[in-house]
Image (tube, rainbow, N blue to C red):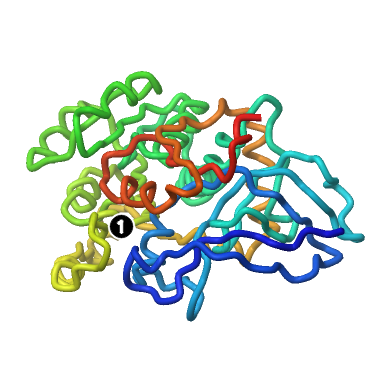
Amino acid sequence: MENKDAKVYYVAKKGNIRNLTLNQITLPPLGSHEISVKVKSIGLNFADIFAILGLYSATPKGGFVPGLEFSGIVEKAGKEVGDLKPGDQVMGVTRFGGYTTRIHIDPSYVVKMPSGWTFEEGAAFPVQALTAYYALFTLGNLKENQTVLIHSGAGGVGLLANRMAKRLNAFTIGTIGHESKIPVLQSEGYDAWIVRNRNFRKKLRDALGERPLHLILDSIGGHIFMESYKKLSPMGRVIVFGSARYGHGGDRPNWLKLIYLYLTRPKIDPQAMIQSNVGVLGFNLIWLYEEKHLMFEIMQKLMEMNLPPPYIGHRYDWKDLPLAIKHFQSGTTTGKVIVNTDETHMT
């Protein structure tokens, strides 16, 4: 008998973290081109929080289940699915709906987990790896021995971006919000690091020395973005993939602060960009969901890179998912924040 029940964390009304509630649902019949996955672990992302707070334009209308990535075991495969079978351990991405114990999904969004990886490591990989690869190579056009400035260097994207950039012998500089995260950057092989504060301009100048700055991965915004942008060398690029400065630790958006931050956001003159011969590119990972063949192609390239398992900074049980979100909001986490759906997540 096919098991179609799933437990999900559901948001009936956006705008407050407390609106996240645990529900049981019945999944629709499995399509012929779908697989059913028993979810073991899920990864948290800033997009989850912005979506719950109603600050993410790509969020589904009305009530929804947050979550963009997961790992688990294939329970059943549709008649038209050829590459995956029941029992396969997989990791994947979904355009929301990831906060669940079971999911039906197109196998184009799923790959088999590398041998030896845990479900936690599988759930920590897809979104961050896709983001880092797309930013570094597809948009950033990173070349051998170039210099890369990686903001939020101790986060999930930052750590993977550093590992990927090192494959091209890049000189990597990671920025962090607190000095307690320095040991993580040291252990991951960053060449230099900066604790972001009012002296950021000088710290960046000192970290670069005589090196040109070729590429910036920015998830911060504000004056940090602007000071970084000013140090770009000719043909340099900033890749913007987030705006962490809009986040905060409260249950609801602080609209007055958000309006102020929006009105004071950095503004760049395109004609000045011509004179400096630099560029700014932005992307939203949700766009890749609509280009699933490109997403699958990138995932295959990531598998070929044979990267070590991602760094797991924090683990939570399923019942404590709201606490995991609050911790993630605090800005004090390092690496990936993972939520496990049951007691067998380490198998």
When the figure is inspected, residue 248 is found, relative to residue 122, above or below; the finding is below
**Residue located at (18% from left, 34% from top):** 195
Q: Amino acid at mark 1?
A: Ser
Label 1 sits on a secondary structure element that is: loop
Relative depth, front residue between 248 and 20: 20
Q: In the displayed structure, does residue 264 sit left or right of residue 134? A: left
Residue 304 x, y percent position in the rendering: 68, 33
Q: Quadrant of residue 19?
A: bottom left
Q: Quadrant of residue 233?
A: top left
Q: In the displayed structure, does residue 242 sit left or right of residue 96? A: left
Residue 32 x, y percent position in the rendering: 86, 65
Relative depth, front residue between 236 and 135: 135
Relative depth, front residue between 192 and 307: 307
* Residue 141 shows up from this direction: no
Q: On the rendered image, what quadrant is the C terminus found in?
A: top right
Relative depth, front residue between 311 and 298: 311
Residue 274 x, y percent position in the rendering: 30, 60
Q: How many marks?
A: 1
Residue bearing the label numbered 1: 243
When the figure is inspected, residue 206 is found, relative to residue 279, above or below; the finding is above
**Residue located at (36% from left, 49% from top):** 323
Few, some or many residues within 10 Å of mark 1 (<14, 14–19, 20+)? some
Q: In the displayed structure, does residue 316 sit left or right of residue 264? A: right
**Residue located at (23% from left, 59% from top):** 250
Can you name the residue that lies furthest to the left here?
198
Can you name the residue that lies furthest to the right here?
79
* Residue 220 shows up from this direction: yes
Q: On the rendered image, what quadrant is the N terminus found in?
A: bottom right
Residue 171 x, y percent position in the rendering: 36, 27
Q: In the displayed structure, does residue 330 sit left or right of residue 169? A: left
When the figure is inspected, residue 99 is found, relative to residue 216, above or below; the finding is below
